Image: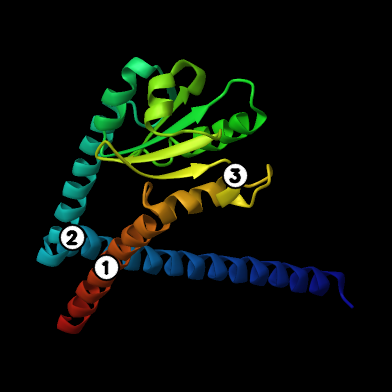
Amino acid sequence: MDPNEVKSKLSNLAFGNVMAAAARNYQKEIVAQEKAQISSSVNEVDLDELMDDPELEKLHADRIAALKKEAEKRESWKKKGHGEYREITEGDFLSEVTGSAKAICHFYHREFYRCKIMDKHLKDLSPKHIDTKFIKLDAENAPFFVAKLQVKTLPCIILFRQGVAFDRLVGFQDLGGKDDFTTKKLEAMLIKKGIIDDKKNQNDEEAEYDESARRTVRTSVAADSDSD
């Protein structure tokens, strides 16, 4: 074959490859532009039209109000000593249990191993259940209230609602009678007795709000598409 003919064919092939590559790049650019236009259109709906939706605005306003109210309550609880597991004295006892709507008081002995186990679990629960006060009182240094509340076995967890003792956990008998019970088991028992709230239900309420907002967004987008 003539060398010049071979050179010409190779040159044409290279040119063809370049043109094919250019065509592919052009096609990619067109697709990218189309995606950008679609994204821009969606953003315009989200920001301009959806924010003017009365139902979505009401959901948003309600949510903001609820969050503000919750923040105010949390701040009030923290001022009362909620959110941490604290030791108090016998002189502080009455003001502590009557100063909060819900309080858990652990009567303990410094040398009792089971009291230390209970301390660990209550310390873990206190920041999670900030609406309930978690405190501890050395039984040896609180003879008046030990006698008044008939505390005979330690550890003894007494539950207060509006300053009134309404229930208790004595030793580990409600927790399986063994030392290796979990914090979750204690939490479930305290929920059952009504001294702390089930956080799962609160999370469900938040999820319900999020789903309601999503439904409103979907409805608004669908309505906008129909009008087009």
The type of residue carrying mark 3 is: Phe
Q: Which residue is mark 3?
A: 172
**Between 179 and 7, which is closer to the camera in this rendering?**
179
Residue at figure coordinates x 10%, y 64% from the top left: 54
Q: Which residue is mark 1?
A: 212
Query: Looking at the image, is mark 3 or mark 2 nearer the viewer?
Result: 3
Residue at figure coordinates x 37%, y 59% from the top left: 201
Decide: few, some or many residues near mark 3? Use Cα within 10 Å; few <14, some 14-19, many ≥20: some
Residue 202 percent across, percent down from the top left: 35, 55
Say which quadrant the C terminus sits in: bottom left
Disc 1 and disc 3 in contact, CB within 8 angstroms: no
**Between 141 and 189, which is closer to the camera in this rendering?**
141
Decide: few, some or many residues near mark 1? Use Cα within 10 Å; few <14, some 14-19, many ≥20: some
The type of residue carrying mark 2 is: Leu
Secondary structure of the residue carrying numbered label 2 = helix
Disc 1 and disc 2 in contact, CB within 8 angstroms: yes
Which numbered disc flags the more N-terminal residue, 1 or 3? 3
Q: Position of 224 compared to 175: left or right?
A: left
Q: Which residue is mark 2?
A: 59
Query: Which quadrant of the figure has residue 86?
Result: top left
**Between 118 and 70, which is closer to the camera in this rendering?**
118
Colour mapping? rainbow
Residue 108 in view = yes
